[in-house]
Amino acid sequence: MRKIIFLLTIIMFFFKNSATANYEKKIYDFSIKDITGETIDFKDYKNKVILVVNTASYCGFTRQYDELQKLWDLYKEKGLIVLGVPSNSFNQEKNNNEEVKEFCEVNFNINFPLTAITEVKGENAHEIFKWAKENHGKSAVPKWNFYKILINKEGKIEDTFSSMTKPMSKKLIKTIENIL
């Protein structure tokens, strides 16, 4: 019995929850360029819940923009920031920021913050995605477009959600409401 408990303890140590991650930095230590070239300083989002979503214009999940906008409209006054991060990491984004901005505004009436086109995986990934991987593990690395990283009010990763998880899903909304 002792051997089993010992082995379980060792296994639990290796698969520890990200809540125990040793964050040297928090999201507030970073900035990123927005779609118009201005700087988004995450310090401005202190005490907010941030949903970071890598997006793409030519993806099968692009219709999720509608639900991201609904989520933003419903929860922005309660402290939710929806941050779209257009990316060509999966070769499904337009050629430049102006085209992305126009596409999002014309087709989806997007008014939540969008970043400039940004790499989200690999060695050229933006530092916030490297930070996410370092502190939350491989589950924070986008597997495809419209992957979602939820940051809590402490500036740490609360959870991640696959591209298949719709922005207005019960699962995502419940998690957001619990940390708002």
Image: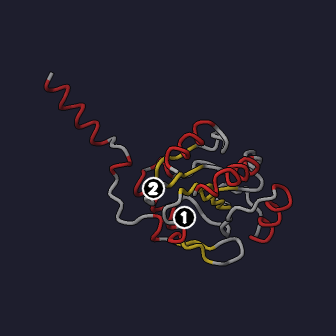
Which residue is painted at 67% across and 70% down in the image? 116
Give amino acid for label 2.
Answer: Lys
Residue toward you, 81 or 139: 81
Residue toward you, 24 or 125: 24
Q: Residue furthest right?
A: 106
Q: Residue furthest bottom?
A: 38
Residue toward you, 6 or 20: 20
- Residue 125 is tagged as 1
Which residue is painted at 24% across and 31% down in the image? 8
Q: Quadrant of residue 24?
A: bottom left
Q: Quadrant of residue 173?
A: top right
The x, y position of residue 153, in whole percent, is 47, 57
Q: Quadrant of the N terminus?
A: top left
**Left or right position of 45 against 105:** left
Q: Residue furthest left?
A: 2
Q: Quadrant of residue 35?
A: bottom right
Distance from disc 1 to disc 2, alpha carbons, whole Å, reads 10 Å
Mark 2 highlights which residue?
A: 133
**N-terminal-most mark, 1 or 2:** 1
**Left or right position of 31 against 1:** right
Badge count: 2
